[in-house]
Amino acid sequence: MTPLPNLIGFHVQNNEWFAENVSLTKIAEQFGTPCYVYSQKALTQSYMAYEKACIRSDGSRRARVHFAMKSNSNLAILDLFAQLGAGFDLVSGGELERVIAAGANPELCVFSGVGKSISEIKRALEVSVKCFNIESIPELTRINQVASDLGKIAPVSLRVNPDVDAKTHPYISTGLKDNKFGIAYESVLHTYRAAKEMSHCKIIGIDCHIGSQILDIQPYLDALDRVLLLIEALRLDGINIQHLDIGGGLGIDYGGDIAPDITQFANTLLNHIETKGFGDLEVIFEPGRSLVGNAGVLLTSIEYLKPTEAKNFCIVDAAMNDLMRPAMYEAFHHIVPVIQKNITPQTYDVVGPICETGDWLGKNRELAVDAGDLLLILSAGAYGSSMSSNYNTRPRAAEVIVNDTDCYVIRERETISSLFAFEHRLPKK
């Protein structure tokens, strides 16, 4: 049996799962299911594990965390990380507006993404984002023109595609030459020279991101060495790089995975940069999953147990629209009963009510459960709620955060009527 991940903030007490010091049963009774539940303690401890490496022994800062908010963009979670001192990595104008709505500082935002629109660029310039991570020469040209129209100077960094295999799922690998992201390694120097000549762009950094759910430090070091060579060449060319954005993508333990310790991982990269003689650079980390993944769970109720000749199905009220990762990536999430019963377990496929054979959350799971019981889907804090949809006209789940003995709703459950509030019937003739 695959071992459970090493969780902070979720534990079993008297045969019942708790979020910090609150029973998951009570949360289900109060807020209903499906429901995302987050531990504030786990969120804080994960962030502080990065921060421990980012601060030198003399108290000076050598790196900063910019939370990759695509992994979880709830306003309360953004607010918490902002209070802890984080900046943000965003990939859309909507995410920028979320940062502002959360009361965070847009000047601590790096704007990534391959398809920035004119309106998104204009808004980002108006609120003075820290940097645009440039992914193509046409984008660089567009940003220069928008900045010129506004009478502003755009701070820019080029995202390098180092052609390094992160050895992760192909859908979340971003650093290979056949991926859509970044500027090809062989074209980087030429593109920086072009940026240097643009009147309304100011070069301030260099960026690299090679993928997600990466469990091996070596691909980071390989990519880092390639980027450091570019920085050296750029300096010889009279182009001064002020910051090095080494991206995110650090994996987590979903159960049986050996994920690097966060502080050790960050220290390894930062020490490598300093050893190579680039300790003067401001360094940016862009973690997402490693901050929120194991800080959240999805709470769901069993609607039916359906035995068939081929297999047994455990049909729950959560579905692929609530948690897309299993259907999209064949991703594994541990599924456990909230209350552990002393009954004979059966092997089930845990599936949702959506009309798709691909609507499954876990296959071949040994569960000792009855209809009406609660299940907990672990490691759901990253790319759970943020990827959810309304497929089959299903309202998105509620979201709750737990702080010791207190629970707070941080996203109300959607109503059916809200789903078609912006739609219109045909006019009557």
Image (cartoon, rainbow, N blue to C red):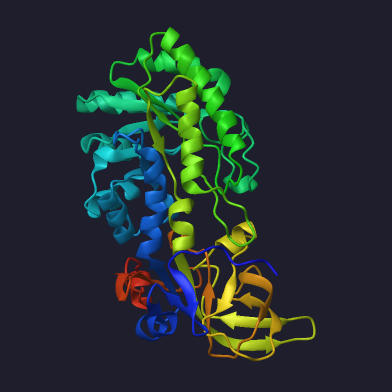
Residue 178: percent from left, percent from top = 63, 33
Which residue is found at the position 35% from the left and 64% from the top?
40
Residue 338 in sight here: yes
Residue 32 image-quadrant placement: bottom left
Judged left or right of residue 107, residue 93 is right
Which residue is found at the position 31% from the left and 24% from the top?
145
Which residue is found at the position 47% from the left and 38% from the top?
267
Residue 121 image-quadrant placement: top left
Query: Most extreme residue toward the front, as rendered?
Result: 57
- What quarter of the picture does the C terminus occupy? bottom left
Residue 179 in sight here: no
Which residue occupies the foreground of this view, 336 or 177?
Answer: 336
Residue 104: percent from left, percent from top = 24, 48
Judged left or right of residue 45, residue 160 is right
User: Against 196, is 128 above or below?
Assistant: below
Residue 270: percent from left, percent from top = 45, 32
Residue 45 image-quadrant placement: bottom left
Q: How many marks?
A: 0
User: Against 105, is 385 above or below?
Assistant: below
Query: Most extreme residue toward the right, as rendered?
Result: 309
User: Against 20, is 301 above or below?
Assistant: below
Residue 152: percent from left, percent from top = 22, 25
- What quarter of the picture does the N terminus occupy? bottom right
Which residue occupies the foreground of this view, 263 or 322?
Answer: 263
Judged left or right of residue 153, residue 400 is right
User: Against 300, is 141 above or below?
Assistant: above
Which residue occupies the foreground of this view, 127 or 394?
Answer: 127
